[in-house]
Image (cartoon, grey):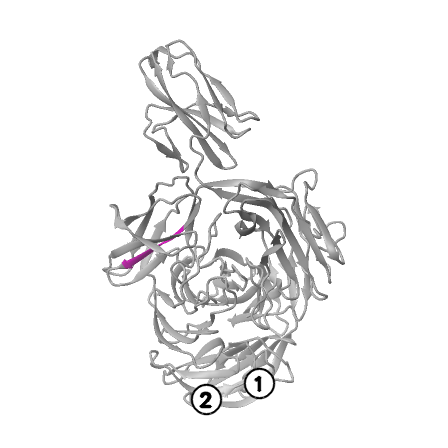
Amino acid sequence: MHSMKTKVALLSLLLLSPLAAQDNGTTLLAKVKSYSEYNDIWGYTAPDGREYAIVGTTTGTAFYNCTDPSNPYEVAFIAGPGSIWRDMKTYDHYAYIVTEGGGGVQIVDLANPDSPSLVKTWGSNYWTNAHNIYIDVPDAKAYVCGTNKGMRVLNLNNPTTPSLWATKSSPYIHDLHVQNGKAHLGEIYDGRYKISTVSTNFPTRDSISTPGRFTHSAWANATDTVCVTTDEVNGGSIATYDISSPTNIKHLDTWTINSNSIVHNAYIIGDKVYASWYTEGFVCADISDPSNIKFEASYDTSPYNPGSGYHGAWGCYPFSPSGVIYISDIEQGFHIIKVDGASLAFDHTPLPNTQNEAGPYTVEATITPLKANATVASADVWWRVEGGSWQTSSMVASGGANRWTGDIPGQASPAIVEYYIHATDSQGNKGWYPETSWPGDDTYSFAVGVIRTVYFNDFEGWADEGWTHGMVKTEDDWQRGAPAGASGTSQRHDGTSWYDPGAAFSGALCWGNDLGNAGNNGAYSSFTENWLQSPVMDCSNASNTKLLFQRWLNVEGAPFDSARVLVNGNVVWENPVGYSGEKFNILDASWRQQTLDISQWADGNPSVVVRFELLSDNIMELGGWNIDDFRVISLDGSTLHDTIQLTGPSNLNVGSTGTWTLSQAPPNSRYWLLWSISNAGSSVNGHALDLGTPIKVAETGTTDATGSASITSPPMPLSAAGMSLWLEAAAKKSGAIYDSNIIPLDIQ
């Protein structure tokens, strides 16, 4: 575990999950918690077929007999140097255990696996601390990586007295997988997956940057055609690659179970990926088509909510001959599960934002049973408003193959409605959508009301437009301009590579700390404290106010360096402080939207100021802030009906013209004069009109600075004689739709 923290749609709010474990296509067989905190896990199978789990803790290593996976029992505990990091692998009838606590590698004899014994601790003259170990069993080589002396490779031909075979000093290798003469390296601080030939100098075959630029691990399938990597960052993902030509790695797909959570370790067996995913628990993904990763199953081991950082599942071991999975959870201990596979498949188009308060909001989904002889027994929509308590609406089979519908009742605006779908098949298997490790860990959401832009700046103007910047100490390096794509490597204990954007998110310009132009290196200074501040924004008519901006941020983890967002002097976001001893460097490798709820300070406030701050210490300077497409929005109530005044004749003769005037519309806004033969009401883009369908457009244009417009019709044609129509005006401004009263029109 080395890392940082950092399908959320506009105005989507992630829920807090219930504090209990949950299975989705899995079954819990056993759980043991005997120690305060746990780390990695591995397994061992004795020659007679007995199966064992080797479980790391912060004070040593526990060994469990798991031959009956429903009743595991501890057979030994071997104490070791205290550390939150401990890693272990097996060779022959020995276990090899390394730790960041120092002391070399512990060699444990498993000849009698019900009574493991420590043979010796070896290698302290070759390294002090180590992070991970991998053993290529056919080649009898142990790869000790993440040491203070680089990666040390040991020859295990004499298992109790290894010899040093090779050293790879740089770059820092966090973890690796070796098979068939190729080493698959996770170069975490360079954000790179690399294939090297196994030899004393490890020549590179090819390398590729991983999506999150924080490559924690890499694992190839048995045929050396596909590899999976993990990026141990908040919102990190697993990614698949075509490695059939090891000199030409090709990225295939990127996938995450929850965009707020952090993936850790992943392995491939057949066409499945088995991963430990911190607060999500154990996750199994289907890579039968490695270009289209799909959810298969999960088991949530942790009571922590998504986005809570480095808690929950640390490691998993999927290689036991019996097919059971071992999982280590940092706080919850040792778990044994079996994977049953997904029971239900879902297809659903999320509901859009709406101005319709009457409802209902109909949720439609195709729910397909996947188990033999199973049918869908029941389905429900779980929904809540503004983060309140969950409620359910039953879904009913609505005709068509596996089609189900359910209604969420209408809601008074303004409101945010979150929902997810839950179903059970006739065999008692459950599933939910979105597919996460706990139902509702991620949701769909829609707004009831009008989304209105209060302020927007893409920083493309000729001047700074009221934005100011300065420093408290050392240097003000805030610049507005075109970013130069600077990059670098900085370190406190280990080297960390960072990358600034090579272009603004939109247009040509953005704000940032040292954009890397004109001889600058792109990094912020040491011992600095500086800021960028918005002009005063009037939010006096705003409600449910949100701040949205595009961010590209590289900053060392708190408390060493700090990146903050403040509203009227109140901190609304800052880079987090992590797990004890851990580094939460934020290393954005692409633009990403950040959404912050600022309603507490902005709603109804005529004077709102947003401030970005950066503070650093004397070691390890990265790229800092880059900001683009800054936006403040308000979610207003659906009170925009009949706000436009439409006046004009209600009777016309064939051959005559008519003039209608609209007033009290938004100034300089697009308008439409609409007509219909019905006044039964209808909805257009979620906005309720008085006209019924079908609706026709008679005229369109732009209102003047007072919000007025005048429309004169052509002469009424003879074919219109005897018709009775209804007229209504509509206008659109800042994403909001406004309408008028309706006027009858009889043509004679």
Disc 1: CA contacts within 10 A as few (<14), some (14-19) or many (>=20): some
- Locate the N terminus and report the quarter of the image it occupies: bottom right
Quadrant including the C terminus:
top left
Give residue 651's position: percent from left, percent from top. Answer: 37, 14
**Type of the residue with mark 1:** Pro
- Where on the picture, by quarter, is residue 293? bottom left
Q: Let me know if residue 624 appears in the view.
A: no
Q: Name the residue that disc number 1 marks.
A: 162
Mark toward the viewer: 1 or 2: 2
What segment is highlighted magenta in the picture? 418-424
Q: Which residue is mark 2?
A: 116
In the rendered image, the vertical position of residue 671 relative to residue 302, given as above or below: above
Secondary structure, magenta segment, majority class: strand
Mark 1 and mark 2 lie on one chain; the one further toward the N terminus is 2
Q: Residue at x 68, y 45 (%)?
A: 467
Q: 334 or 251: which is nearer to us?
A: 334
188 and 352: which is toward the camera: 352
In-front residue for pair 648/52? 648
Inter-mark Cα distance, 1 to 2: 19 Å
At horizontal 62% and vertical 67% (from top left) the residue drawn is 203
Q: Residues within 10 Å of mark 2 (few under 14, many from 20)?
A: many
Name the amino acid, label 2. Pro
Query: For this view, does 339 lie left or right of residue 606?
Result: left
**Secondary-structure class at tag 2:** loop
Question: Where's residue 338, x and y in %?
Answer: 35, 71
Question: In the image, which disc is placed on residue 105?
Answer: none
For this orientation, the residue located farthest to the top is: 655
| Residue beneath the point at 36% across and 49% down | 348
